[in-house]
Amino acid sequence: MTRHLVVDTDTASDDAVALLMAVASPDVVLDAVTVVAGNVTLDKAVRNALFTLDFCGAGHVPVHAGLERPLVRPLSTASDVHGEDGMGDTGLVRAVGRAATEHAVDALVRLANEAPGERELVTLGPLTNVAAALLRDRQLLTKYRRTVMMAGSPDCVGNVTATAEFNVWADPEAASIVLEAPGERVLVGWNISRLQAVMGPAEHQRLSSLATPRARFVQEVNVKVAEYCARVTGLDGYDLPDPVAMAVALRPALVTESERVPVRVALGEELRGQLVLDHRRGAGGPGDVEVVWRVDEEAWKELLFAACAAK
Ligand code: RIB
Ligand code: CA
C-alpha cells in the first residue's frame, strides 16, 4: 500500500538526510514539505529543502514556506551545530527552484482536510507551523493518520540545555499545543538519537564504502555536526535525530519499546523545553503521546544505508 507523507522541517543537515530517506522509500509518496524556522532562518531552510529534494530527484515535491519565528519567543537558530548554511558550510548548497505560493500553515490544514486519515505527518523541527495550523483546526492531528515528531528528550538529557532538546526548546509554546492536541502522535526524542542514532567510525566507513552521491551527501552535510559533537556533546561521531524519527515513520515496527503517557512542556525560563511525562495513576487518557524508548538500531541504520545506496 502506498503511503503519503507530509514533512515539516527546519532543513538542516540531519533534516536533509531524513528527506533523502523519505524520497528513497519505495512505498512512500512525499506529498509536500512545509518549512519552519529553527536550525537556520526560514529562507535558508526553504533553500536547503529545495536543494535537497532536487538532489534526490524529487524536485517536483512542493515546498511551502511557513513561520519565520516561534509563536511567542524570538528565533534561536543552531548555526553553531549545523553551520551558517545549516548544511555543513561546504559550499554544496545552491539556490534551486522556488517555494510554492501557498503558506505552510495553509498547506498543513488543506492537506489534512482534503484527505482525512490518508496522510501521515512527520515533524523534524520546532512545532511552530503545526501549532499554528492547530489553532486554525483543533482536530488537525486527528486528520493525519499519525504524526511522528522528532521532539523533546523524554529522559530529560538535553542538547540545547541540560534538560531540553532544541525543537521543543526553540518553541515550547508550540510544542505544548501539539503535545496536548487530539490525534495519534509518536514522539521520537533526543534520547533515541543520542543512544541509538550515532554515526560512529563503523557507520562512517560503511558510507565511504558505498561511495554513492547520496552517501557522500550525508557525510558532507554533517561535517559541522561531527565537529560540534566532538567539541560539545562528546558523541563518538555525529547523531542523526531526524533520520531516526523518519525511520520510525517509514517503518513503525522499528520501535521496540514505547509507552503511551501524557506529556507536557516546561515553559518557565529555568526548565524551558523540558518534557514532563505524567506517570501518575489515572493521569493517562485519549491525549496520551506514544513516547519511544528504544528502536531496532541495526534495522533503522540499514534503512539509512539502503537509501544512500541508490545511485
Ligand atoms: O535537537 C535535534 C533537532 O534539532 C533536530 O531536528 C535537528 O535538525 C535540530 O532541528
Ligand atoms: Ca530538524
Image (cartoon, grey):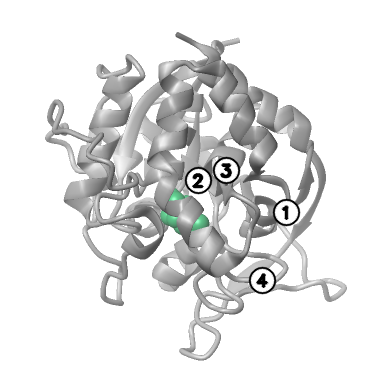
Are there few (<14), some (14-19), or many (20+) residues within 10 Å of tag 4?
some
Residue 216 as seen in the image, left or right of residue 202: left
* Residue 92 in picture, x, y percent from top left: 25, 34
Disc 1: which residue: 195
- Which numbered dot is residue 85? none
Residue at position x 32%, y 61% in the image:
79
Tell me if I can see residue 205 in this picture. yes
Front residue (pair 221, 158): 221
Q: Quadrant of residue 52?
A: top left
Quadrant containing the N terminus is top right
Amino acid type at image mark 4: Val
Residue at position x 62%, y 64% in the image:
234
Are there few (<14), some (14-19), or many (20+) residues within 10 Å of tag 1?
few
Assign a secondary structure to mark 4.
Answer: loop
Disc 2: which residue: 141
Chain-order first, disc 4 or disc 1: 4
Amino acid type at image mark 1: Leu
Residue at position x 37%, y 23% in the image:
31
Q: Do labels 4 and 1 touch, CB within 8 Å?
A: no
Assign a secondary structure to mark 3.
Answer: strand
Q: Do labels 2 and 3 touch, CB within 8 Å?
A: no
Amino acid type at image mark 2: Leu
Name of the residue lying farthest toward the right: 281
Quadrant containing the C terminus is top left
Front residue (pair 303, 266): 303
Disc 4: which residue: 157
Residue at position x 50%, y 17% in the image:
211
